[in-house]
Image (tube, rainbow, N blue to C red):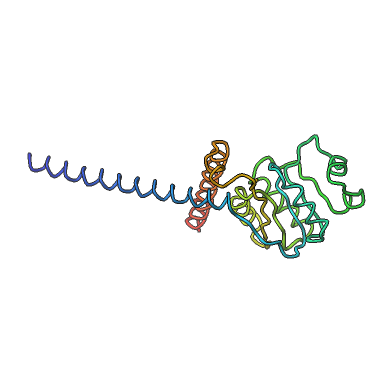
Amino acid sequence: MPEANTQSRYALGKVIVALFMVALLSLCALLIGWTLFIGYALTASESPPRQADAIVVVTGGAGRLERAINLLKDGKGRKLLISGVHYRNTSKTFLARFNLDKKTINCCVDLDREALNTVANATQTALWAKENNFKSLIIVTSAYHMPRTLLEMRRAAPEVEFQSDLVAGPTRRPLWSRLTNWNTVHLLTKEYFKLLASVLHGTTERLLSHRGK
């Protein structure tokens, strides 16, 4: 009996050590991913996008609408979808704010009021692209939001080619100042875990779909 108890304690100790190592490695992976994500979000930059069928901007961050409308004015796409528009905003709002003429508003700017989150942005974009037979889209959103946005867009419309045109955060302050700003770090940390949740959700869906076959 004492020998059996010793073996049980030994086996339990091995399980505890194994669980500890798994937890430690998972924590290290999370921290490394978080560091890389923070670095990307604060330093990312891109060259201007190529010509595409249309442009989609996901509302919710400074500079996004301005960037998307400039792309439309530059002829980078034939139409613009503004996804996640507040119910108080109308075509007249954009006419006054961005100096767009009525002809451009009527022919080339569509407002999506249905989307309330990133998944819905992607769903509404996929429907809009299908209705208009668009095969290539330029996606405009903030740098920190771009990875999750593209992930959801490609999941919702795998047949569409997506380009990213990210809007970087304010760069007037030194990088170290932004890294030590609680509001910035809090925002980026929340977005990092949202991205992880989106990745895990997609992985789970694929596994369940494969198992169902």
Q: Is 54 positioned to the left or the right of 141 in the image?
A: right
As drawn, the residue found furthest toward the bottom would be 50
At 92% from the left and 52% from the top, the residue drawn is: 103
At 61% from the left and 44% from the top, the residue drawn is: 173
Q: Tell which of 143 and 192 is nearer to you.
A: 143
Q: How many marks?
A: 0
Q: Quadrant of residue 85?
A: top right
* Placement of the N terminus among the 4 image quadrants: top left
**161 relative to 16, above or below:** below
**139 relative to 91, above or below:** below
Q: Is 29 positioned to the left or the right of 86 in the image?
A: left
As drawn, the residue found furthest toward the left would be 2
Whole-percent x, y for residue 45 in the image: 63, 56
Q: Tell which of 83 and 50 is nearer to you.
A: 50
Whole-percent x, y for residue 134 in the image: 76, 61
Q: Is 194 positioned to the left or the right of 71 in the image?
A: left
Whole-percent x, y for residue 179 in the image: 53, 43
Q: Is 159 positioned to the left or the right of 96 in the image?
A: left
Q: Tell which of 24 and 84 is nearer to you.
A: 24
**141 relative to 113, above or below:** below
At 84% from the left and 42% from the top, the residue drawn is: 97
Whole-percent x, y for residue 121 in the image: 68, 47
At 72% from the left and 59% from the top, the residue drawn is: 137
